[in-house]
Image (cartoon, rainbow, N blue to C red):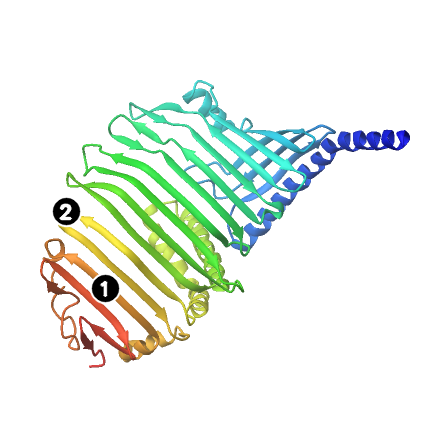
Amino acid sequence: MKKLLISLICLAVVCAAGLPIANGIVMERTIKSAVEANNTQAAKTGTGFRMKLLEYDRGLFSSHVKWCIENPNGFPGSETAQLVLVDQGTHGFFSVTSQTTLEENPWYMQWVNTRLNGNDPLSIQNRFSLTGATGSTIHMNAFSIKEKEKMLHVHALNLNVSTGNGFETLDTKGRWEGLSQGSELVMGPVTFTSELDQLTDIIWAGKNTFSLERLKIDDGKSDPVDFSGLTVNFDASASEDKKSITMTTDFHLDRIELGGKPLTDWTATFKLKQMDTASVEQFMRLYSNVMTQAGQRLEITGGNPGDFQNILKNEMARNTPQLMSVLNGLLKKGLGMEITDLDIELPEGEVAGSLDLSLKKDLDPSNIFVFAMQPDMMFSFFDLDAQLSLPYAFAGGIPNLTEPLLPGMATGLFVIKGDLLSLDMHIREEKLFLNGHQVVLNQ
């Protein structure tokens, strides 16, 4: 019995001693898998971001890793095309922890040395576990820099990011205390969270939240902006068979000041229903490709921002066949859009309304040209229920709001009800009704 106990103890000691080594192997596999997965996805989506391992030195109880993120077109707002990251990992019994620095980026260190007196505000710690899960804790100390002869104070940031085995889940939680520049600019604190599951190569389902406690901008040159208590929630959910997705966004604003008058409680919920998952993914790839190509062509022409709109139009025209294919996939029975809980207070009164628009059957994009010749045909494809009320004092002076715009209309888009302009529109039995009267378009 004693020999068995001693043997078990020795075995446990050997296994425990081997855990740091095993964790080091897990870290290496995880990083290499992350690089490969990112580059595969980047190739599929057409984005310019790539990851590359520059050095990997794995010892028994520690690892030294140098890798980089590359964008051939440069990062936004910078001519820098490469961000180099250096990790120094320590192999523990249950996980590997590593410290990440940006010290091998000359442009970053120059900024730290010249603008922050050599005090690097950024601290990044990563954790790799035997289960394959990873986590990152990012902290940025507060710092101040001079901008346009005035001190800009950038406040502290804390961010936690974790992924599950295989990078199929992503959870984030962060808080940024914001920034300020005297009484001219006050922003923050900002908080944000996400709980996401990978649905396809580029689509993630789950919840995101964002809140901004206050934003005040008053430079003395333009109308001041001052609001507080902004909360935005975004949710993407898939059907049981994952063939369609629904995206919902709701926002709430506690207070906003317009024209010197404080207003409260702005709310609305926006929903895109039953979008074909494959077509949404196809659209995202197409959008990424169009924007990338437009950016590259802009560089060729000398980078004049005034040329970008024309370049983008040309890229859209060049990709018309792909765009029509996306539309054909999206315009399926059940596709819909909803606006609910719309409640906005203005100095002149309250704006309230709702919208529910959906497809009753598949719609071929070519039918749009038929609708131009026979507009009433579109009512057989859609369900519609919409209401909107506006303060007359706010919109009563806008021409043609209360006057019929077409021969088939008995009223304008709005009718006057007391001190409000009111719209009531719906489709019933394949006919369009506006403010209680049928609208006939085939005239």
Q: Which mark is residue 78?
A: none
- Compared across the picture, whether 16 is left or right of 27 comes to right
**Of 106 and 129, which appears nearest the observer?**
129
Three-letter amino acid code at the position of disc 1? Gln
Say which quarter of the image contains residue 269. bottom left
User: Which secondary structure, mark 1?
Assistant: strand
- Labelled pair 1, 2 in contact (Cβ < 8 Å): no
55 w.r.t. 416: above or below = above
- Compared across the picture, whether 324 is left or right of 37 comes to left
Mark 1 or mark 2: name the one nearer the start of the chain: 2
Q: Which residue is located at x 14 percent, y 47 percent?
A: 347
Quarter of the rendering occupied by the C terminus: bottom left
**Of 364 and 166, which appears nearest the observer?**
166
Residue 440, image x and y in percent? 21, 79
Q: Which residue is located at x 14 percent, y 68 percent?
A: 412
- Compared across the picture, whether 128 is left or right of 213 comes to right
Q: Which residue is located at x 40 percent, y 67 percent?
A: 335
- Compared across the picture, whether 144 is left or right of 161 comes to left
Q: Mark 1 — residue?
A: 387
Residue 57, image x and y in percent? 70, 31
Residue 146, image x and y in percent? 33, 23
Q: Which mark is residue 347?
A: 2
User: Which secondary structure, mark 2?
Assistant: loop
204 w.r.t. 402: above or below = above
